Image (cartoon, rainbow, N blue to C red):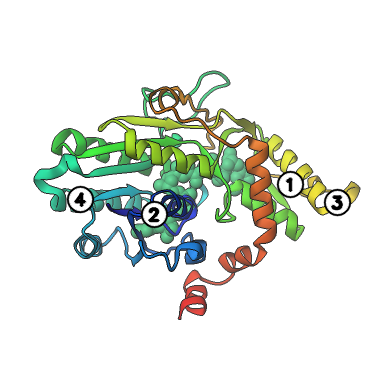
Amino acid sequence: MNLLITGGAGFIGANLVLHWLRNHPDDVVINFDAMTYAGNLENLQEVKTHQNYRFVLGDLRKPLEIEKAFTEHNVEAVIHLAAESHVDRSIHGPAEFIETNITGTFNLLETARKFWGAEMSAHRFLHVSTDEVYGSLGSEGKFSESTAYAPNSPYSASKAASDHLVRAWHHTYKMNVVTTNCSNNYGPFQFPEKLLPLLINNCLQNLPIPVYGDGKNIRDWLFVEDHCEALDRVFHQGVSGEVYNIGGANEWSNIDIVRFVCKELDRELGRSGDDSCEKLINFVTDRPGHDRRYAIDAEKIETALKWTPRYSFEQGLSKTIRWYLDHQDWVKNVTSGTYQDYYERQYG
Ligand code: NAD
Ligand code: TYD
């Protein structure tokens, strides 16, 4: 099978490309990525010379670039991850979120429809989305697949719009789609603007750790490899037109997770007392429209597809901390200068 993975140079995408080629080495994986600040080909060193790995520098905002990839690689299936993904960036500059997440998804769906034509049911399209489309929970309850959409940030609104487009292409054009809505991921290759890698990095650099508002907002954290395993399961066994929520049943308030990671890092780095990472915690002005709580009810995927996370939070976190400690150069590279400079230095 020739499988196009969009956003394969990003955090989850890179983990998925690696997962796919380890588990399905006979599939040809075409990584279609525009290489924004969030894309990094260094994440894919392990498969750079794999005979079934291809890289296409392409932008979802440009339909001709998608068509070229479909033609040249005879694309038979799609897993769509490429997106602008950071809520804070979406608050400061929503335009790119509309262009990539909504128009980009539309361009991809239309290209797939054009190429797959009458044989639509033979070609799977997996759309990777977020639990943030469901809005914010109070102290009780969880998001299920039937929870009404109520997105609150430009990011979640753009993802919600893309989910609706995918749904409509199934109902109207009979496209063979499955959609997943997953909780917050953590793990290797995550750009250090999201809470966990930012927190680890700031501790290592002795920089303040910004905790928004009262720190009591709650997120449901899942190790990225468990997400990849779930995507694999939904891609192969999910029922066309269905939605699957993915989550780790692992709710933490921000301040608790920050304190927990600080303790783990103190242990790793031999810090204590005034030198302790907790001393870096700095409560700052809240994010506008900050969703209070996310929590996923993952019963459907657990029952229907027999997926459950393999990693406990302690295991996933310890792997993640170890990875960032061992990859300080990676952090330096992705945070210094423009990625284009870095790309040219690395790849000419
Ligand atoms: P990321 O920001 O790390 O990576 C996004 C990738 O998409 C980058 O490689 C970037 O270069 C690429 N990209 C951006 N705009 C593009 C365009 N116009 N054309 C082609 N490529 C483009 O994102 P991530 O955290 O890996 O998230 C991947 C997907 O998973 C997103 O759709 C996101 O909404 C969803 N998701 C993320 C999380 C999470 O916790 N990170 C949770 C649930 C769902
Ligand atoms: P983030 O990793 O940006 O993911 P999302 O907003 O998609 O859930 O943020 C996770 C939580 O951590 C969220 O409640 C906002 C909070 N947060 C901070 O308190 N400080 C920070 O510096 C960041 C980046 C996030």
The kind of secondary structure element at disc 1 is: strand
- Residue 295: percent from left, percent from top: 52, 28
What type is the residue that disc 4 sits on?
Ala
Measured Cα–Cα span from mark 3 to mark 4: 53 Å
Q: Check disc 3 and give the amino acid type.
A: Arg
In the image, what residue occupies the spot 64% across and 55% down?
323
Q: Would you say the residues marked 3 and 2 are in contact, meaning their CB atoms lie under 8 Å apart? A: no
Give the mark toward the camera: 4 or 2. 2
Q: Is residue 79 above or below residue 175?
A: below
Q: CA distance from mark 3 to mark 2?
A: 43 Å
Give the CA distance from mark 4 to mark 2.
24 Å
Mark 3: few, some, or many residues within 10 Å (few <14, many ≥20)?
Answer: some
Disc nearer the start of the sequence (3/4): 4
Amino acid type of disc 2?
Answer: Pro
**Along the line of sight, the residue nearer the viewer: 316 or 195:** 316
Residue pictured at 23% horizontal, 55% vertical:
75
Q: Which residue is mark 4?
A: 112
Identify the residue at horizontal 20%, vertical 50% (top origin): 112
In depth, the one of 49 and 11 nearer the eye is 49
Element type at mark 3: loop
Mark earlier in primary sequence (4, 1): 4
* N-terminal-most mark, 4 or 2: 2
Asked which secondary structure carries label 2, the reply is loop
How many tags in the picture? 4
